[in-house]
């Protein structure tokens, strides 16, 4: 898989995760409260809707984490095969820093 494919998948999972989190309401509202009365029983009940949204949130979060880690291996890196750290400073002249002189006559008494 190429790096671009990973980026597209990460964006899709991120958008889906945002939508799922926005549908939830931590005080019992959200999507699960909109199925009030007998309609909730036909869709599996409020508790089942909360469980579904919770599991979907965790699944998308784990998938996004895994995709981000895997995309690190797909990043194109130019020149990986011939890179040597010891050759990077060849031909560079270095000088030693000047030693500061101290004046011993200016002592504080």
Image (cartoon, rainbow, N blue to C red):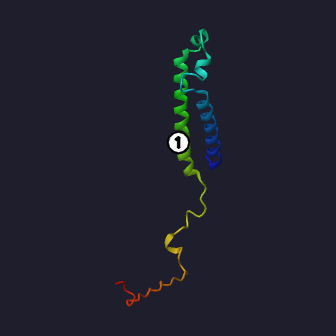
What residue sits 55% from the left and 31% below the top? Answer: 57
Q: Quadrant of the C terminus?
A: bottom left
Write down the quadrant of residue 61 in the picture.
top right
- Residue 15, horizontal then vertical, whole percent: 64, 36
Most extreme residue toward the left is: 109
Most extreme residue toward the top is: 38
Residue 5 shown left or right of residue 69 in the figure: right
Q: Nearer the viewer, residue 47 or 76?
A: 47
- Residue 71, horizontal then vertical, whole percent: 57, 48
- Residue 97, horizontal then vertical, whole percent: 47, 83
Q: Nearer the viewer, residue 18 or 4?
A: 18
78 vs 5: above or below: below
Most extreme residue toward the bottom is: 105
57 vs 3: above or below: above
What residue sits 57% from the left and 11% below the top? Answer: 41
Marker count (numbered): 1
Write down the quadrant of residue 88 in the picture.
bottom right
Q: Residues within 10 Å of mark 1 (few under 14, many from 20)?
A: few
- Identify the residue position indicated by label 1 in the image: 66
What residue sits 55% from the left and 29% below the top? Answer: 56
**Disc 1 element:** helix
15 vs 87: above or below: above
């Amino acid at each position: 898989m190429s790096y671009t494919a990973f980026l597209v998948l990460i964006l899709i999972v991120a958008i889906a995760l945002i939508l799922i989190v926005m549908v939830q309401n931590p005080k019992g509202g959200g999507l699960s409260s909109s199925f009030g009365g007998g309609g909730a029983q036909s869709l599996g009940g409020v508790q089942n809707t909360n469980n579904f949204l919770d599991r979907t949130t965790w699944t998308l979060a784990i998938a996004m984490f895994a995709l981000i880690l895997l995309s690190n291996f797909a990043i194109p890196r130019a020149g990986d095969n011939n890179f040597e750290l010891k050759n990077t400073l060849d031909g560079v002249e270095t000088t030693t820093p000047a030693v500061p002189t101290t004046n011993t006559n200016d002592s504080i008494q």
